[in-house]
Amino acid sequence: MKSLVVVFILVSIVLISSNIFAPDQGGDVMTGGVKDLSNPDAPKTIESKDIIYFKTYFVYADEAQEYSRYDFTAAKQADGTVEVTWADYQLESKAVVGPEFLVSLQEIIDQHKMAGYNGIYRVTSSLPWQLEPCSFYCEYESGEKISFYEDGNPDSEWMGDIVDLFLPWFPSRLIQTQQQGKKWTANRGLSFASNAPRAGKGLGCDGDKWVSRL
C-alpha cells in the first residue's frame, strides 16, 4: 500500500514539474501583458484623399458610464455611391449613400490626424471590455493605407465623430436603440461636407418618424 502512495506522489511531482517548466507554445499573452507588433516604419502621412474602403470597430462611451460596441464599414461602389454598414453580433444593416460621405469621413481622419497612428499594433491582455482593442482600417485609391489596432479609449473624440457620421443613415436602428433605453445625440458641432444628417444637427422625432434636421 505504501508503495502505491509513493508512486502516486512521484507521478504527481513529475506532472506538476512538466507544467511549470514546459516551454511557451505560443499561447496568449499573460494577464496584463502587452503584445506589440507595431511597424515603426509605417508612413505617418497619407497624400491621397480618395477613400475606397473603410472599416472600424470600437467601444464608445455614448454617455457617462454607458458604452456601446460599434462596427462600421464604408465601401465605394463602381457607380461612385458608397455602401455603408452598421453591424453587431445580432444584426447587420446597410444603406447606400452619396460620394460626399467619404469626403466627410476624410475630414474626420484629417481633423484627428489618424494617419499618425498608422502601423500601431499594441494591445494589453485582460483589460475590461470597455477598453477592448479598437481597429481602424482605411484604404485609398492610391494604394495608401491607414491601419492600427490598439487598446480602446471609449472617450476618444474620433470615435464619437465616426458614430455621428454613420448613425443617421440608419434611422430604424436608431429607433430600436431608443426603445432599448439608450440615447444618441450628435452634439459635437462638426461641419461635414456630406448632405447626410450631420453632426450638430442630429435627428428629430416627428410623430413616429425620424427626420433629419439639416
Image (cartoon, rainbow, N blue to C red):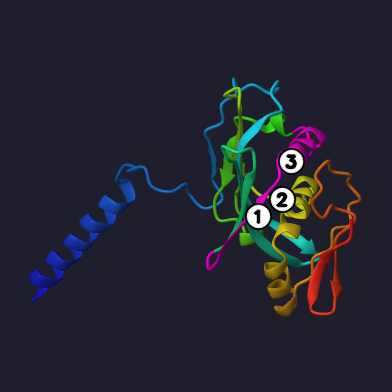
Asked if marks 1 and 3 touch (Cβ < 8 Å), the reply is no
The residue wearing badge 2 is 153
Q: What residue is at 69 percent from the left and 23 percent from the top?
A: 48
The foreground one among 156 and 81 is: 81
Instruction: Place residue 34 in its image quadrant.
Output: top right
In magenta stretch: residue 96: yes
Looking at the rendered structure, the kind of residue marked 1 is Leu
- SS at circle 1: helix
C-alpha span from label 2 to label 1: 6 Å
The foreground one among 1 and 139 is: 139
The residue wearing badge 1 is 131
Q: Between disc 1 and disc 3, whose residue precedes?
A: 3
Looking at the rendered structure, the kind of residue marked 3 is Leu
As displayed, is residue 140 above or below residue 77? Answer: above
* Residue 105 tag number: 3
Q: What residue is at 25 percent from the left and 51 percent from the top?
A: 18
Discs 2/3, front: 3
Neighbor class of circle 1 (other Cα within 10 Å; few <14, some 14-19, many 20+) is some
Question: Which region is colored magenta?
Answer: 89-113
